[in-house]
């Protein structure tokens, strides 16, 4: 017995230094070969003193989200393809590094929120520079990009194979939700890991556990189906009201408290009338999301004609070089179809 304990202690000393909770319990199993296995039985709550964070992607939403974590006292290492986009975060105390692997090597939990599934694959799975090539055992990758459910499952499998965990946690709420920390977060993966990360998610919004790996992505895609038709309805309603000779300010105020009221109306009604097409969420990214939705529909044998129509309208914006505008720019496509412009009605209006 004494010999076994001494051998166990020597093995522990060989472990690389890492920031695990003091409640971590190590168990030694013996067979032909002695294996050392770490078992998290009663994990300490995630907090700034025991968890280092990494962040990949500091765009319209990512920058605000990352700032909330820094303001809460967490140590952050960030990577973005354009270093200047991280300057605000660097001035707040974040450290910039030049690869996702470098982020992971200095982090216990790494968040990513990038543009496309190809970006997700590169920053997480690339064998030379990706997150999983640098993340220590026990680390967690949280992908908040709207991406493909099958890719989320693949990442989870790859993470598990190297002793790490992965959560797909796309978000809804746009730039305003990111700034006000009121995002809806849709999480897929192991429930115990999502619960462990709750202190972090709570700094960004409200997390909803949706089930197994990929279910967070499926939920976000379903969210986009609803938003797409809602935006078409909002813009068509404004076109209709304009042709009917209604005051558009009064029109939006009147319908906002009735059954036609919606989050889309609250977030984008004012912006549309003020010709404010700055992106809270890019047209290019929405086209990507709707394309993924339609491919999943094909896989499921589903016909969603409203989704298909919305995607075609958004594709027309891309064709006119308007892909970097916000999703509320959909009104431009409907104005062109009807050979009119709401611009003459544009005037500053109060919050609905």
Image (cartoon, helix red, strand yellow):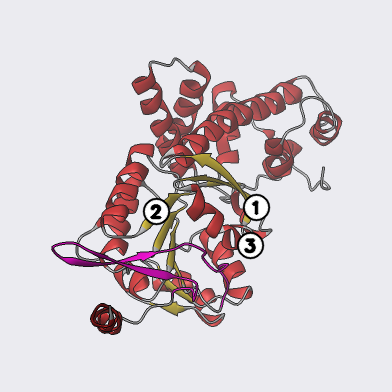
Q: Secondary structure under badge 2? A: strand
Mark 3: secondary structure: loop
Read off the magenta span: 20-48
Question: Is 47 inside the magenta-drawn segment?
Answer: yes
Measured as percent of width and height from the top left, residue 133 is found at 25, 65
Residue beneath disc 2: 166
Mark 2 Cα shell of 10 Å, populated few (<14), some (14-19), many (≥20): many
Q: Which of 267 and 292 is in front in this view?
A: 292
Provide the residue designation for mark 3. 203
Residue beneath the point at 80% across and 23% down? 245
Locate residue 202 relative to residue 133 in the image: left or right.
right
| Mark closer to the chain start, 3 or 2 | 2
Of the numbered discs 1 and 2, the one sitting upstream in the chain is 2
Nearer-N-terminus badge (1/3): 1
- Whether residue 161 sits left or right of residue 321 in the image: it is left
The quarter of the rendered structure image containing the C terminus is top right
Foreground mark, 1 or 3, reads: 3
How many residues crowd mark 1 within 10 Å: few (<14), some (14–19), many (20+)?
Answer: many
Taking the magenta stretch, the answer to whether it contains residue 260 is no
Q: Distance between the residues labelled 1 and 3?
A: 12 Å
Q: Give SS at disc 1.
A: helix
Residue under label 1, please give it.
Answer: 177
- Residue that lies at the very extreme toward the front in this rendered image: 1
On screen, 204 above or below 220?
A: below
Residue in the picture at 45% in, 70% down: 24
């Amino acid at each position: 017995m004494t010999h076994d304990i001494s051998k166990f202690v020597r093995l522990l000393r060989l472990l690389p230094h890492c920031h695990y909770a003091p409640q971590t319990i190590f168990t030694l199993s013996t067979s032909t070969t002695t294996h050392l296995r770490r078992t998290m039985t009663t994990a300490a709550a995630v907090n700034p003193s025991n968890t280092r964070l990494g962040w990949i992607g500091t765009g319209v939403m990512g920058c605000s989200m990352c700032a909330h974590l820094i303001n809460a006292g967490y140590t952050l290492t960030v990577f973005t393809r354009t270093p200047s986009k991280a300057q605000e975060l660097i001035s707040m105390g974040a450290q910039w590094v030049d690869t996702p692997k470098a982020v992971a090597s200095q982090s216990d939990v790494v968040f990513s929120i990038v543009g496309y599934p190809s970006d997700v694959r590169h920053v997480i799975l690339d064998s030379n520079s990706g997150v999983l090539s640098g993340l220590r055992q026990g680390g967690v990758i949280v992908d908040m990009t709207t991406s493909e459910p099958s890719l989320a499952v693949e990442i989870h499998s790859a993470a598990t194979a190297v002793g790490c965990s992965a959560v797909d946690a796309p978000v809804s709420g746009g730039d305003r939700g990111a700034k006000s920390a009121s995002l809806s977060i849709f999480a897929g993966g192991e429930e115990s890991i999502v619960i462990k990360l709750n202190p972090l998610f709570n700094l960004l919004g409200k997390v909803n556990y949706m089930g197994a790996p990929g279910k967070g992505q499926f939920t976000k895609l379903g969210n986009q189906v609803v938003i797409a038709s809602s935006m078409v309805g909002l813009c068509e309603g404004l076109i209709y009201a304009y042709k009917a000779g209604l005051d558009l300010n009064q029109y939006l105020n009147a319908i906002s408290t009735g059954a036609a009221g919606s989050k889309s109306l609250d977030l984008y009604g004012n912006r549309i009338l003020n010709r404010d097409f700055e992106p809270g969420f890019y047209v290019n990214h929405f086209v990507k999301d709707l394309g993924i939705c339609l491919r999943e529909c094909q896989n499921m044998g589903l016909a969603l004609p409203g989704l298909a129509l919305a995607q075609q309208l958004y594709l027309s914006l891309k064709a006119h070089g308007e892909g970097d505008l916000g999703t509320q720019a959909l009104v431009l496509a409907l104005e062109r179809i009807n050979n009119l412009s709401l611009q003459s009605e544009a005037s500053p209006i109060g919050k609905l």
